[in-house]
Image: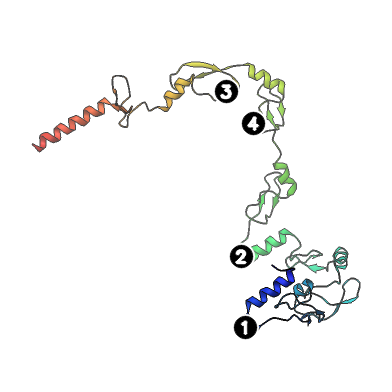
Amino acid sequence: MCCSRKCGAVLLWQHRDPTAGQWKREDRECDKCGATYYPSRIEQRYCSFQCSVTPRATFADRPCARCGETFTPSVAKQTCCSLACGTRFKQKRVRPVRACPQCGQPFRKDQTFCSRHCAGEARRNEAGREVAERDCEQCGTTFKPASSNVRFCGHACAMCSRRKKDRACEQCGETFIPHTPNQRCCSHRCGSEIQKTRVDRTCAHCGTTFTVWPSTATRLFCSLLCARRSRVRQHCKRGHEFTRENTRVTRSGERVCKTCMAEHQLRYRQRRAEAA
């Protein structure tokens, strides 16, 4: 339809506002830097993208904190003239010495208190509560905790408490440090030896004695049939046992207690007799 993007934009402006007539593009000055430019849009106010994104506010010139040259800052908190000066200034900056408001000791950190202990003391003083002294669970030293959930006097004792404790091998009885929480033997040889011995168990359903390997020592039933039967109810809700003589199976496959049915029929007949 048009030969170029500029011609298409001019045609679009003409159809946008017919009452204004044709818009004649003329050179105008940039609202930021004052340079003369040829606009491509009616609402264009700046000569380039850099001028449009530059903050509108202007700040007074100030010296660079590192090299001392005078520059115009783009933001209010800018202290260095360039990124290189800012990076080197942060690397070589000497933090001022300040006093801890809790203990009064001088330190050079960008924080309010010199340590976590002083910060905890200040919080407790503001809350008006005091934590009593306690003994370290690892070394037994008496210390004053920073909070109520502190159990050890220092980081070293806390790391020692996390180490795996020694245990005795179930096969040879020697003491060893386990690699996993479920390790029972000190070596692969002892583990193989203990797997060769079988353990006798009693079935929880039928009472039959059966033999299992140590790896399956938690087995409760002698067979899959006993395991399935154990999941089925053996008594009704009134305590009557489901035996062959006392059980009636309905068309839907549901088991019904014959004793409960007889008691229900007896109560029904007594109510009919009383009503008559």
Circle 2 residue: 127
Residue at 21 percent of width and 31 percent of height: 264
Q: What kind of residue is marked 4? A: Asn
The numbered dot on residue 133 is none
- Residue 9 in percent (x, y) is at 70, 72
Circle 3 residue: 216
Circle 1 residue: 19
Q: What kind of residue is marked 1? A: Thr
Q: Quadrant of residue 180?
A: top right
Labels 1, 2: front one = 1
Element at label 1: helix
Q: What kind of residue is marked 2? A: Ala
Question: Considering only order in the chain, which callout, 1 or 4, is on the residue closer to the N terminus?
Answer: 1
How far separated are the C-alphas under marks 1 and 2? 73 Å
Q: Nearer the viewer, residue 85 or 53?
A: 53
How far separated are the C-alphas under marks 4 and 1? 88 Å
Circle 4 residue: 182
Residue at 71 percent of width and 46 percent of height: 158
Element at label 2: helix
